[in-house]
Amino acid sequence: MMPQEQVAAKSQELHQIVDELLTIVSDAVQEQTPIHEVEHKAFKTLLRAGQATVQLLVDYLGNGDMGEEHGLPDGTTLQRSAQPQPRPYMSIFGEVDIQRYVYAEREGQAIRFAAVDARLALPESKFSYLLQDWDQNFAMEQPFSKVKNTVQRILELDQHVDSLERMNREMAKRADAFYASQKAPPAKEEGEIFVQTADGKGVCIRRPADAPPITSHQHQSGPKPDRKKMATLGAVYSIDRYFRTAEEVVESLFRDPQQEQPKKERPRPCHKRMRASLNHTDINGDEVEGRSAVFGWISDEIATRHAGSHKPVVCIMDGEESLWNMRDLLQEDVPMIDILDLLHVTPRLWDAAWLLCPGKRDLAEKFVRERLLRILRGEVDSVVRGLKRMGTMQGLRGAKRAKLQTICGFFEKNRRRMCYDEYLAWGYPIASGVIEGACRNVVKDRLERTGMTWTIAGAQAMLDLRCIYLTEQWEPFMAFRIEREIERLYPYRHTLPALSWCVAA
């Protein structure tokens, strides 16, 4: 601990800064200072007061001298450093000067103990936990360069973009452990149906520095080879039943958004949780296959939340067979209602309409409405037969005939997942708006902005944190990772003797 006289002097300095706030008010009254200028001066003063407060705490704790030797509870005897060592620390108020003795088994070896670090529960990096929280909260919505500029404008802190990116990757390393620690939500807060869903979304990955040079610049349609890597996104939630007729569903899909329409109150998803994964290398150096990782998490989440429940489990996905195969591989023993996302049916009906009613918008819309209504009533086979018959009658040939066959084949392959009349009767959801929204919110809105490319590690870190952020789990995650880091860094923190404040106010 610092001598009492020095601490008292620093305490008095802090009081003087705080007194400046009263001076700001009195001056504003006499000089008719605009309120925005008062805000500006007050905030600057508060930053100085905050920095002085944190520095006073550090100075009061002293240099952490525990004697030339210090014994740990495990019996290890450590040696004190010859001189106090600096510890960089960046708080939200600015840099804080920390000089303290550190202890190691021998001079020059890794630090095993530092009393000041343990008392303050300093983070592993130089950035305070609160600053990390704010930085990365901003980074969930904005590029790192904009985060740097925003924080600098508000707090006058100069951070490098590289530091923010490293911070993001380090923070994301705790995502897996956080998910593994989560308990099932209270059963009384769950909806009447459990829903799981998954989809894929491409992420632009930059070429590695050691990649062979591009030998051809010939234009190719579609995405450039090796430019995008597929991320698999999964979501699990529960929801109450929502009963609608086939006619109501069709009307909702064709409703004019400009016209006010009375709407039924839709139930909202309960305790939605999401994961997203690329093929990547984890913190242990193991190779992770993204799709199996996400479906493994889905399987565990359903098993945990559905345990002891008789509520139905619904799986809604598009027609990509590899998604259904992965689900079958990991959840073959789980009774489940499979539903083809209706939003992957309607585009194919429109494609068929343009083949069979070319250039006639009114006829095409009528065509889609009629067949969608019949599909929702359970008449899938009849609709497919009708499409084939119309194609034959109109003499479709070549590419047009092949396209119509592909559409019919898609419906036939997914027939068992298109029992929409039964799903509507049971109040099941029939469209995967949650996962479609996740692909947009998790990936597109943050990772697919103009000109953005990512490393695999950087993209995976952002996916991990975005899933946590967008499901309103940011605060629990931050508390979890801070607690775990403190436990790891300072296992003997609880053995330090308590101190008391002994400076007169």
Image: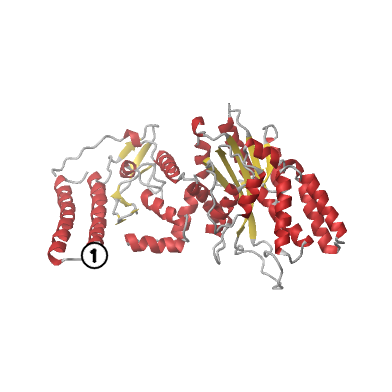
Where on the picture, by quarter, is residue 397? Answer: bottom right
Q: How many marks?
A: 1
The answer to whether 82 appears left or right of 341 in the picture is left
Whether residue 492 is visible, yes or no, is: yes
| Mark 1: amino acid | Glu
Whether residue 279 is visible, yes or no, is: no
Q: In the figure, 219 relative to 145: above or below? A: below
Task: Work out which residue is located at the far top of the displayed protein and give it.
Answer: 308
For image coordinates 80% across by 46% down, the residue present is 382
Q: Position of residue 6 (x, y in %)?
A: 16, 49
The answer to whether 36 appears left or right of 298 in the picture is left
For image coordinates 75% across by 62% down, the residue present is 354
Task: Specify how the rendered protein is coloured.
Answer: secondary structure
- Nearer to me, 294 or 58: 294
Neighbour tally class for label 1: few under 14, some 14-19, many 20 plus, Cα within 10 Å: few
- Nearer to me, 116 or 120: 120
Q: Quadrant of the N terminus?
A: top left
The answer to whether 318 appears left or right of 277 in the picture is right
Q: Position of residue 164 (x, y in %)?
A: 44, 57
- Please, what secondary structure does the residue beneath circle 1 have? helix
Question: In the rendered image, which residue does mark 1 sit on?
Answer: 37
Q: Position of residue 150 (x, y in %)?
A: 39, 62
Q: Position of residue 464 (x, y in %)?
A: 53, 49
- Nearer to me, 459 or 502: 459
For image coordinates 26% across by 35% down, the residue present is 498
Q: In the figure, 314 relative to 170: above or below? A: above
Where on the picture, by quarter, is residue 505? Answer: top left
